[in-house]
Amino acid sequence: ASDVTLEEESSERIRFLSHHDELTGLPNRAMMQEFLDGKLHSRGEANSTLVMLSLDLTDFKLVNDIYGHDAGDKVLGEVAQRLRNCLRATDLVARQGGDEFIIIAPAIHKKEDIRTLCQLIIAVINKPFIVSGNEVSLGVNIGAAQSPQDALTASDLLRYSDIALYEARNLGNNSFVLYQADMAKQIVQRRELENELREAIKENQLFLVYQPRFDIRAGCINSVEALVRWLHPRHGLLMPDQFIPLAEESGIITDLTDWVLVNACQDIGREFNHISVSVNISPMEFKASDVIARIKNVLATTHFPAARLELEVTENVTLCSPENAQIVMQELKTLGIRLLIDDFGTGYASLYYLHSFPFHGIKIDKSFIFAMNDSESAKSIVEKVIGLGKDYNLEVTAEGVETQEQLQQLIKYKCDIAQGYYIGRPVS
Ligand code: C2E
Ligand code: MG
Ligand code: MG
């Protein structure tokens, strides 16, 4: 004989709050867990498969930093809405915390359908958001794991979709990866190699080889490129492509570059009076502002003249925070250091950057030189790229020169410098 409406309503509300994320109204982790357990236990009935997607927004932190947390909250609300709109009624999207979301789609069986869903999600997140009157674009990375193929329990599914997400992040913005059986093992191996690489730098397991660069104009060798090698105690000799990407992902690259810089400057400074040395730098190092201080430090400790140091960086350096990269490069130039674009023609630089960035020269990628054997048009391309570089007042190096014919052609095209096995292999 009493009215319990209010009580009922408030316990409803408490139930709702304990199962939903306040900000987005999406189910929270607890509810996702309940939903998942329910689905996994009802296995054996009609819909026995499900896919879990782990999503992580990219560049969301920037929204918070630039426009404030209120704006960030609004964007998260809109992301939640957009995600709901791409799903079916039987699917669940939950906020995992921060800018991470989980989607559980019980009706999906085929890999093809998972891919389609991921592509759809990426497309809807990529559509610009309006934040305080400005257009802001976000990206998203997605990792997917399936039950029963990949895992049978909620915790394994979460772990595997998270591992797939980790792989997706490594592929770059707006990627998705479906979990594969050996990924967990690979991650453990990669962690191991990471730790070993840290040790390797301290214990001098790394060493440098030098490849001559032949100055066609002067008719002599007046510079060399330093290339790093790792003599691994168990795996033997490792080439840079086997550990540089790992060093870049894990942040070890700064220590590695410092090691290479110091040793290259010491070696060349001790052995020669006039030869310059070029060192490869990862584009991501230009993001950090300490690169100038690091290089100044190396020059000071090794007493190596800045004018004999060249830095090679792929043209993608212009992609990540171009303004900052430009400032850093200008300072390096002021120090007297020369900057070369490595693997020219394989990256994403626009011609605009050729004169707006203070580059001293370009190194035409070896694939262009190799192709000269095959066709007249490939030769003509090399000739024109050399002309283009010169029109921008850049010193042009051709990489991957393996035959006398190639060298003859390059001389004819007035290329400035040649590098490759025909001139000389990398040597200690
Ligand atoms: P890169 O800077 O373009 O270096 C040239 C690569 O081409 C070297 O391979 C060299 O051995 C190879 N090469 C040179 N001439 C020829 C040729 O005539 N024919 C063929 N087939 N290959 C030739 P390596 O030493 O394996 O280095 C691979 C890449 O690893 C380098 O490409 C560079 O991007 C990176 N790398 C090497 N050392 C370092 C380093 O100390 N730091 C960083 N960040 N990256 C490095
Ligand atoms: Mg190079
Ligand atoms: Mg190269």
Image (cartoon, rainbow, N blue to C red):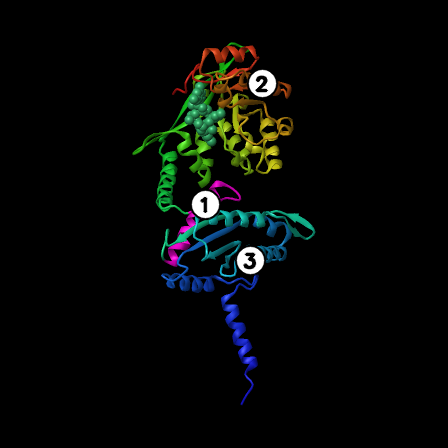
Could one spot residue 361 in this view of the protein?
yes
Residue to which mark 2 is pinned: 386
* Residue placed most toward the observer, 420 or 428: 420
Q: Main secondary structure of the magenta part?
A: helix
**What crowding class fits label 1: few (fewer than 14 Cα within 10 Å), some (14-19), or many (20 or more)?**
many
What secondary structure is marked by label 1?
strand
Could you say which quadrant of the image residue 203 lies in? Answer: top left
Q: Amino acid at mark 1?
A: Val
Position of residue 191 relative to residue 234, above or below, is: below
In the rendered view, would you say 35 is above or below 274?
A: below
Query: Rounded to the nearest whole Å, what is the CA distance between mark 3 and mark 1?
Result: 21 Å
Query: Viewer-proximal residue, 249 or 106?
Result: 106
Residue type at numbered disc 3: Arg
Tell me the crowding category of disc 2: few under 14, some 14 to 19, or many 20 or more residues within 10 angstroms, Cα based.
Answer: many
Whether residue 227 is visible here, answered yes or no, is no
Q: Which residues are magenta?
A: 153-178
Identify the residue position indicated by label 1 in the image: 177
Q: Which residue is mark 3?
A: 84
Question: Which circle's residue, 3 or 2, is located before the other in the chain?
Answer: 3
Q: Which badge, 3 or 1, is on the more N-terminal residue?
A: 3
x, y percent for residue 306: 54, 24
Badge 3 local density, few (<14 within 10 Å), some, or many (20+)?
Answer: some
